[in-house]
Image (spheres, rainbow, N blue to C red):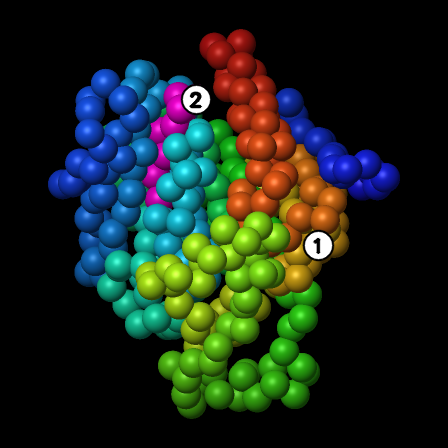
Amino acid sequence: MFCPGSALNVVINVMFAPVLIEESKHTMQNKEFNLVTGDGTFLIGRLWRPAGSAVAVICIVHGIGEHSGRYDQWARQFCNQGYLVYSVDLRGHGRSEGRRGHIDQINNYLDDIGSLIRLVKHNWDELPVFLYGHSMGGNLVLNFLLRKRQDFAGAIVTSPWLNLVNPPAPFIQKAASFLNHLFPKMTFPTGIKSSELSSIPEQQKSSDTDKLMHHKISVRLFNELKRSATEVLAHPSRFSIPLFFAHGTADAITDFKTTRQFSESIGDNAGFYGAKNARHELHCEPVAEDLYFFITSWIGDILKETRDAE
C-alpha cells in the first residue's frame, strides 16, 4: 500500500590481490581488487572495510553506464556503521574489460555478480551478506536471485529497471527484436541525462564530467534487459528472502508504479519505500539520509532476528 500526502511517502512492509588506497589500518580502508570471471573477463572491483569488526557484507551492483567508484561516498556511510561493502565494475563498464554497453546474454552480467559473490562468501563466510542493486543493477540482482542462488540475508533494490517510463516506440522495439540476431552489437545512446539522475547540481556535474561513464546500449543488451525484467515480474512468489525496494516518485527513467506493485505482489517478505519528488539516483538525492536510515533499520531488524533465532 502507498501512503501519499507527506514530504516523504514511506511504506515499510517488512519481516522485520587488492591495492590499498586508504591511509591507515586504524581507519576505514578502501581497496581496489582484480577479479577474473569464469569466461576469463578481467574485472575491477572495490572494497570498503570498516576499522573495526564488520557486522555484515553489502554487495553493490551498479546501473547501466556507470561504475563502482560512483558509490564511494555512499559505501563509506555504510562502512562507518560497521558494514563491509563490495562492488565491481561490470564487464563493459568503468575500468573492467568488455565492449561498452554490450553483452551477448544476461548471464554475462550474472556471472560477473556470481564471481564477486564467490569471492565474498569465501572470504567472509561467517558474515550475513546482502545484495544491493540499483537501476539496471536492480534488474540484475533480482534475476540473480531468481536464476542462481538465494542464500543471502536479504537484498536491497533501488529504482530497478523493471519497466521504463519512456520506452522506445513499439515499432522501434519490433525493429530491435528483428536486429537482435543480425546486428546484436549495434549500439545507440541511452538518452539518460544527468538532470534525470539527481536534482542536485553538484551531482549532475559529477556525472557529466565522469570519464569512466558511458551512454551506450546495444540492441542485444536492450532485448536482454527487457526479457529479464519480464521474467522477474512474472515470478514474485519465487523470491524467498527479505527484499527492500525503494523508488522515487519523480523518476523519469524507471517506472515507480511497477516497482511498488511488484513489491506488493511479493507480500510480507518485501518492504517498500517511496520517496516523494525524488529522481532516479535516490542515494544522490536530498532523500539519501532517509533512504540510508530505512535501509540500515531494515538490515538491523534482520540481523536481530537472526541473532534471536540462534
Residue 45 belongs to the span the image colors magenta = no
Question: How dense is the environment of label 2, judged by Cα within 10 Å: few (below 14), some, or many (20 and up)?
Answer: some
Residues marked 1 and 2 touching at CB (< 8 Å): no
Camera-side residue: 134 or 292? Answer: 292
Q: As drawn, which residue projects farthest toward the left?
A: 17
Q: Position of residue 240 (x, y in %)?
A: 57, 37
Residue ID for mark 1: 250
Instruction: Tell me where the magenta segment starts and ends, as one range.
Output: 79-87
User: For the residue labelled by badge 2, is the local secondary structure a helix, a strand or a loop?
Assistant: loop
Q: Name the residue at 85% across, 39% down.
A: 5
**Quadrant (top left/top right/bottom left/bottom right) for the N terminus:** top right
Say left or right for 67 vs 98: right
Q: Is residue 154 above or below residue 224?
A: above
Q: Where is residue 82 in the image (x, y as percent from the top left)?
A: 39, 21
Q: Where is residue 241 in the image (x, y as percent from the top left)?
A: 55, 34
* Type of amino acid at the residue the image marks with label 2: Gln
Camera-side residue: 213 or 166? Answer: 213
In the picture, residue 232 is in which quadrant?
bottom right
Say left or right for 239 vs 65: right
Camera-side residue: 25 or 309? Answer: 25
* Type of amino acid at the residue the image marks with label 1: Ala
Q: Name the residue at 65% across, 73% down.
A: 167
Cα distance, mark 1 to mark 2?
29 Å
> In this rendering, does residue 71 appear at all?
yes
Residue 85 belongs to the span the image colors magenta = yes
Residue ID for mark 2: 81
